Amino acid sequence: GIQVEQSPPDLILQEGANSTLRCNFSDSVNNLQWFHQNPWGQLINLFYIPSGTKQNGRLSATTVATERYSLLYISSSQTTDSGVYFCAVEPIKAAGNKLTFGGGTRVLVKP
Amino acid sequence: DGGITQSPKYLFRKEGQNVTLSCEQNLNHDAMYWYRQDPGQGLRLIYYSQIVNDFQKGDIAEGYSVSREKKESFPLTVTSAQKNPTAFYLCASSIGGTGRYGYTFGSGTRLTVV
């Protein structure tokens, strides 16, 4: 099946810093989503971005489908940005609308 | 408010017992999913259903069973055949089709074997 690798696995930031999270995937996809999991386990959908660039406040994401990677940018980080960020993809070849998740990037923003 | 409700939040199971985790949604979504998350890991798909009375196995279906008798409900049973059931279980739903509208997740159930 498709492989999804996220880097770095862990990230410690000082409040106000910027950062970039990366997601590499091993096959062509027609669906790519970024999620944030808060410390209590709740997962929130951040972006649906199989290609191109999107921005939502301090967060933005870019997917270069031809090169099989996606980037999530966090600008002016805040302590509330702490948690785990997951990239999830659906390969074009797959049957059914189901996502394969990467291992996540654990982010800690210190005040 | 529309959303997904998972219950209970915490569940303790004795060795050899079957337990059922509830997942209910009022979003009118066609597709529903069950994922398992182990500490420090990503999510792995257990089962998914795209329409009522139909469901498919995911990557780690062994030791689990599901039903989809109503659009709103997708309960997961963890059977005694699942040898390592302690984990965080997440239910999700989507409109279906291409998934372009994204997934909505419930708040999860933490299952512990005692």
Image: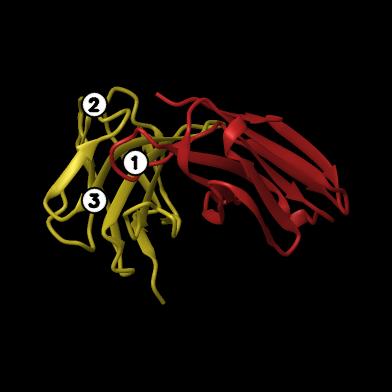
Whichever of labels 3 and 1 marks the residue nearer the N terminus, that label is 1
Quarter of the image for residue A79 reads: bottom right
Read off the residue under disc 2.
B62
The chain painted yellow is B
- Frontmost of labels 2 and 1 is 2
> Circle 1 sits on which residue?
B12
**Whole-number angstrom distance, CA of label 2 to CA of label 1:** 20 Å
Q: Of the two numbered discs 3 and 2 on the same chain, state the one appearing first in sequence.
A: 3
The residue under the point 33% across, 44% down is B34
Quick one: SS at disc 3?
strand
Quadrant that contains the C terminus of chain B: top left
Number of residues whose C-alpha sits closer than 10 Å to that of mark 3, classed few (under 14), some (14–19) or many (20 or more): many
Is the residue at mark 2 from the same chain as the one at mark 1?
yes
Disc sitting over residue B41 in the figure: none
Q: Amino acid at mark 1?
A: Phe
Report x, y in % for residue A41.
53, 49
- Letter of the chain that mark 2 sits on in the rendering: B
